[in-house]
Image (spheres, coloured by chain):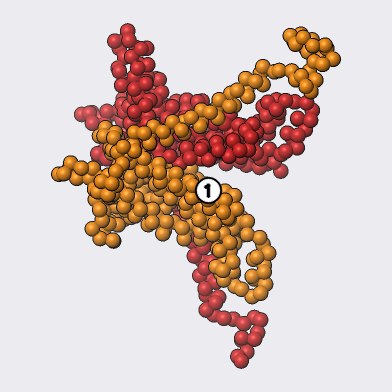
Chain colours: A red, B orange
Amino acid sequence: MGKEQLSIVANRKNKSVVEKAAEVIFTGCGLLAVLAVISITGYMVISGAPALFQVGITDILFGTVWAPAAEVPSFGILYVILTSIVGTFMAILIGVPIGLFTAIFLAEVAPPKLAATVRPAVELLAGIPSVIYGLLGILLLNPLMYKLERMIFAGSPDHQFTGGANLISAVLVLALMILPTVVNISESALRAVPAHLKSASLALGATQMQTIFHVILPAAKSGIMAAIVLGCGRAIGEAMAITLVSGSSVNFPLPFNSVRFLTTAIVAEMSYAEGLHRQVLFTIGLVLFAFIMFINVVLTRIFRKGEATND
Amino acid sequence: MTDGMVSEVRLPASVENSLYHKKIRVGDQVLRGLIYLAAIIAMAILVGIMGYVFVRGIPQVNWEFLSTVQSARKGTFGILGNIVNTLYIIVLTLIIAVPVGVGSAIYLNEYAKPGRLVKSIEFTTEILSGIPSIIFGLFGMVIFGTVLKLGYSVLTGSFTLTLMVLPLITRNTQEALRTVPDSYRSGALGIGATKWYMIRTILLPSAAPGILTGIILSVGRIVGESAALLFTAGSGFLLPRGLFSKLFESSGTLTIQLYLCMQKAKYDQAFGIAVVLLVIVLGINLLARFVTKKFGTKK
């Protein structure tokens, strides 16, 4: 027998090579996520910035006229940005209360068996492809909105009728789509509240509802905030469900106006845009990306704060 | 209790507000009602969506719908091409994303020492899962489509989706690896296994259910994805002529075809596709639940 094979410090070349290779490969896999985010960020800036300077920052961001195909083209996207902000805000306003109360239902109120049927249903809601939400929006919401529109604006000749493809329809679809996110995250936040807080509250004679709304909800605050912020992220980034539901002309975001969101502006025109017009669409992408990054930063803040208070 | 006296319950004061005659709090009842209402709304929405799609869509689904390709000449419509495209994109995406995602999780859990690098990998993975799919679409369209000259093709689509599902696989694998007891690791290393041998024969088999859950969730994400594919995989609907030539051809998935039908106001066909999609999504959900139940890992 060779000496090396007996020794505990034997140096078996091929094994150590495999070991090293494995480590290097796994490290590479890990770094891919970093690389992807860096290159996406870099790419969004590089492709979105030129138009910003070519047209003029204020002309793009604060201009209100969107006429890319006109003889003297104008690329103001203020209304598009406002629509995304207002639309997201309204969707949160509708979706969060329903989502939060459903989460309370699942975590605190429902008997376990009932919760076990409602929870998979909510999860399924998250799995439905966004185009299907869009399809139902067109066929169910839009006609309804059209009826409402005709009732409200019956006497006003100034109003441009949209056939029901308006901001409200899009907001309702968005509210639906953020529901599963809000329910899931808030439910786990509610469940993470230490049981002794709840027992103490109940033992002091508080009713179940008092316990939920005065003890458990405040204790789960940071998790619920995270749910809301994540909901914002989903709503502002959703594209396909609302392209056809929201109408597609650039207007000030009033409830019954046909509007265009940041995402739908890209989807609607990317296939045929050329030159400066195409570059401006990338600028819209950059604006959207900036919003998402802002939301991410807020989110990490919330989580860090939550960790700090839990310790 | 003083406010007990004002209540209208005609009982001797000694019985009021006892354990058997609880004071009825209107506020509490209202809140309870709202909580139930919210849950009912959530359920009603799901039932409504499923019901409406199935009622309108099932009459559209027949053998010809599932087994042919749409043809303007014959005036027929079928989605076989789109089904094949969807499968192509799922398989190719998983082939790339699973090794990378699992590798990344192994690095984070087994090799890396806590520090800056781990934090930045975890942070970027988090960001990657928050980026909207339309941005992935823009990125993929230019980087893979134009710079790598792949155009509208299965490859472009799959590369783009790989970035999208990577966080799902990494996170699920990581959680599965965390649940493997440390004694397994020290046991294997203690009897002389090398680290890679230990990972290959002890950790990966123990973490398999978690990895499987990640894969199933990724398939769900890919099937439902549309915005990231519209500008990357394109909208072709033909059957592949060769196993590999398909990789370079424009290939619309089911969701893209549904969107195109919607745009042309062909709602009947759209509902037919919607039924197929919902059945797939339902199947994936059941499968994921089955896996988590059977192997007892929590999501």
User: Horizontal and vertical percent for residue A54?
Assistant: 31, 36
Q: Nearer the viewer, residue B247 or A225?
A: B247
Residue A63 in sight:
no
Q: Is residue B280 left or right of residue A15?
A: left
Place residue A191 in its image quadrant. top right
Q: Residue furthest right?
A: B14
User: Horizontal and vertical percent for residue B62?
Assistant: 29, 43
Q: Is residue B189 left or right of residue B287?
A: right
User: Horizontal and vertical percent for residue A297?
Assistant: 54, 40
- Dot 1 alpha-carbon crowd within 10 angstroms: few under 14, some 14 to 19, many 20 or more: some
* Residue at the disc numbered 1: B289
- Seen at 53% across and 50% down, the residue is B290
Place residue B50 in its image quadrant. top left
Q: Is residue A162 left or right of residue B169?
A: left
The kind of residue on which mark 1 rests is Arg
Residue B140 in sight:
yes
